[in-house]
Image: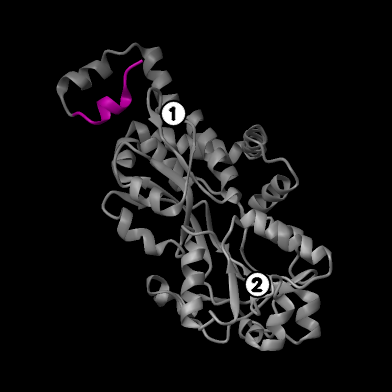
Amino acid sequence: MFDKKAILKTTTGAALTAMMALPHTAMAASHEMPGEGITIDMARASWDTGWWQAEVYSQMLQELGYEVSRITTLDNPPFYQTVAQSGDVDLWVNGWFPLHNSYEDAFSGGAEKVGYVAKGGALQGYLIDKKTAEEHDITYVSDLTKDEVQQLFDANGDGKADLVACPPGWGCEKVISHHFEAYDWDDDFNAIKAGYSASMADALGRYQNDQPIFFYTWTPNWTVGELTPGKDVVWLQMKETKLPESQANLADETTVAKLEGCRGEAPCDLGWPANDIRPVANSEFLDNNPAAETLLKEARIPIEDIFEQNAKMNKGADSPEDLEQQASAWIEENRDTVDGWLKAARQAAQM
C-alpha cells in the first residue's frame, strides 16, 4: 500500500500519478482505511478516570486503518509542551477546558483543541460527609475555617482541616493552590497532594469508620459513585468566586441550577466553572490527517457512560485488558453511531 502521509504532504504530479495508478481494489481499501500506513503517537492523562476514553478513541482510529502506538501517560505540562512539537506526541482526548486554559500558551501555534469528548457537565468542587455537614450546619467551604470545625477534619494533628487535593502537575492543583492564596486558607487547611486515588481510598476508609472527610473531586469520577452526593456526602458552596486569571472571565458560570446533594439554596455555586472534556492535537497532524480530524470532531461519549466505566474500574476491572474490553464493548453497543462517525471521517479523507 502507498504511504498516505507522504502523499498528503506533497503536491508533486508524480505523487498524484502514483495514486491514480493504484489498482481499483487498492483504492477501495484506501477509502475504507484512510489511515493505513500512518502511526499515531497518542498520550493519555495521569488521572486514570480518563484512560478508558483514550482507549475508545484509539480503537476507533484503528478502525480507520491507523496504527496507534502504545499510549503514553503524561502529566499536563509535558503533554501540552510536547504536542505542539510535531512528531513527538500527536494527540490526547483528556483536555479539560477551562481548567486547562493556563496551558494554552504552551501549545498555541503548534496544537489546537478539536471536538468534544463531553461538552459541559464535567463539574468540580469541594465536598464533605453529609453527617458532619448537618450536625454542624456546614454549607460553605468558608464554614470549615472555624477552629472548632477544622478540628473535626484534622486527621494528622496539625490543627488544620485535611483536604484531599490534587497532585502537582494537574490543572486542579493549580486552581486549588490559587484558592489557598485567594481565600487565605494556609492557616486553615492542609492540602494533601499525594496520589489522588490512594488519598481518596484513605478518605473512603475514614468515612466507613464514621469519621469526617473533606475532599475535592470532579465528575465524571468514581468518587461520586462510591460516595453519593445527597446520601453520603454533600457539595459545599462558595460565598465568593475567585478564579485564576486564565478563568477570570467565567466567574458568572460557576453555578449549577439543580445539583443533587448541594448544601444550601439553589442555584449551587461551586466556585468552579463546568468543564468541557476535549481532544487536543498537533496542528500539522490534523492538516495531514483529515480522517482523524473529522473523527475527533464528530465523536462524543456521554458523561453517564464514563461514570459507569469508572465505577467498574474502581471495583477492580482496571487492567489494560479490562480497558480494551470495555472500550470495544462500548463501541459495539453504539455501533450505528460509531459507524456514522467513521463514515464521515472516511468521506473527509476523500475530499
| 269 up-or-down from 122: above or below | below
Which quarter of the image is occupied by the C terminus?
top left
Marks 2 and 1, how far apart at CA: 46 Å
Magenta stretch? 1-10
Image location of residue 272, percent across then percent down: 53, 73
**Which SS class for mark 2?**
strand
Badge 2 is on which residue? Answer: 162
Image location of residue 225, percent across then percent down: 73, 58
Query: Looking at this rendering, what residue extends furthest in the right direction?
Result: 209
Residue 323: quadrant of the picture: top right
Residue 8: quadrant of the picture: top left
**Which SS class for mark 1?**
loop
Residue 220: quadrant of the picture: bottom right
Q: Is label 2 in contact with label 1 (beta carbons under 8 Å)?
A: no
Residue 317 badge: none
Residue at 77% x, 72% y: name it. Answer: 230
- Residue 7 magenta: yes
Image location of residue 334, percent across then percent down: 63, 40
Q: Name the kind of residue labelled 1 in the image.
A: Tyr
Q: Name the kind of residue labelled 2 in the image.
A: Asp
Q: Nearer the viewer, residue 161 or 102?
A: 161
| 294 up-or-down from 170: above or below | above
Badge 1 is on which residue? Answer: 66
Sequence-first tag of 2 and 1: 1
